[in-house]
Image (cartoon, grey):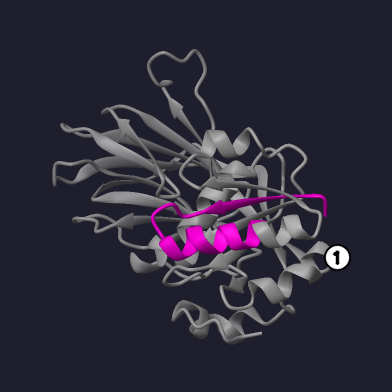
Amino acid sequence: MGKIGILYHPFNKAACTLAKEVSQFLIARGVSAWLCSSWEGESARAQIDGTELLLSVGGDGTILRAAQVALLSKTPITGVNLGKLGFMTELSADEVMARLPALLAGEGWIDERAMLETELTPAQPGTELPPKYYALNDVVVARGAIARVVNIEAEVDGELLATYRADGMIAATATGSTGYSLAAGGPVLHPQSDEFLLLPVLPHLSLAYTMVLASTAKVSLRVSTTYQATLSIDGNMNLPLDSGTVINIKHSNMTTRFLRIHPRTSFYGTLEQRLKGKRDIE
């Protein structure tokens, strides 16, 4: 590999230190390396062209930010875990230097993950066409700062599913099924699944079950609220929603590509260890 990008969590001192050490390690071996805070997405995207690998140094939140940076270039991501869980990361801080030479030599395998695509109707003020937002984990429509339930009318493929009175609704990918969706009572999907989940958050006198939707499904969520609601994309992009806004969600043609170096393992055989944040699994 000739060019590698390194995204790091700016508020994690260990991540900042390790990112600099990795950069020096790569440069000493003749590899062009650039460093950027994961919170400076525009700056990172300006450097992504020609980048053959994006190293994410932090936790799962840093991975989600890296996915946005790598979206259009389809640059593969390898995550180095310095967070609490690191469910999506590949390497521990202790093994990254030992594993880097194998990655530089072209070893490893690609793990491709589905994403969701979201549009708002009407478009946000100041835009002629609604922008598209892409989520690796989840799209969440929820109440804002005022602690009142919101009314969300949910349609699937043009047919009314239900009108929910709830704290919010989650649409989660298979990758995101082990995140907020799981905490809200949703099931776990195999990470390579194209199906996605739709479930309410703390529904009040409303349907409480989770829908597992086909990859071809198209979801529309119409928000009705006296107070402003919120749209969250992967937890790091948050937009205000006015009453009457429709959030359209579907399976995306975009994917996130991970470069893995550990041997392939049974997802089900290691699920419990991963959920507990244990990294001593092969």
Residue 65, image x, y percentages: 51, 48
Please, what is the three-letter code of the amino acid marked with disc 1?
Ala
The residue shown at (18%, 46%) is 149
Query: In which quadrant of the rendered view does residue 252 lie?
Result: top right
Query: On the rendered image, what quadrant is the N terminus found in?
Result: bottom right
Please give the range of residues in magenta: 1-23
**Viewer-closest of 154 and 192:** 192
Q: Quadrant of the C terminus?
A: bottom right
* Residue 151 position within the rendered picture, expressed as x and y whole percent measured from the top left: 24, 41
Pick whichever, 230 or 90, lies toward us: 90
Q: Provide the secondary structure element on which disc 1 rests.
A: loop
User: Residue 121 appears at what percent x and percent y?
Assistant: 43, 25
In this figure, what is the number of numbered marks? 1
Left or right of residue 210: residue 149 = left
Which of 225 and 138 lies nearest the eye of the viewer?
Answer: 138
For disc 1, the marked residue is: 105
| Picture layout, residue 159 above or below residue 170 | above
**The stretch drawn in magenta includes residue 5:** yes
219 vs 262, nearest the viewer: 262
Against 5, is 59 above or below?
below
**Residue 103 image offset from top left, x and y in percent:** 78, 66
Going 59% across and 39% down the picture, which residue do you hit? 44
Q: Can the viewer see residue 132 in this picture?
A: yes
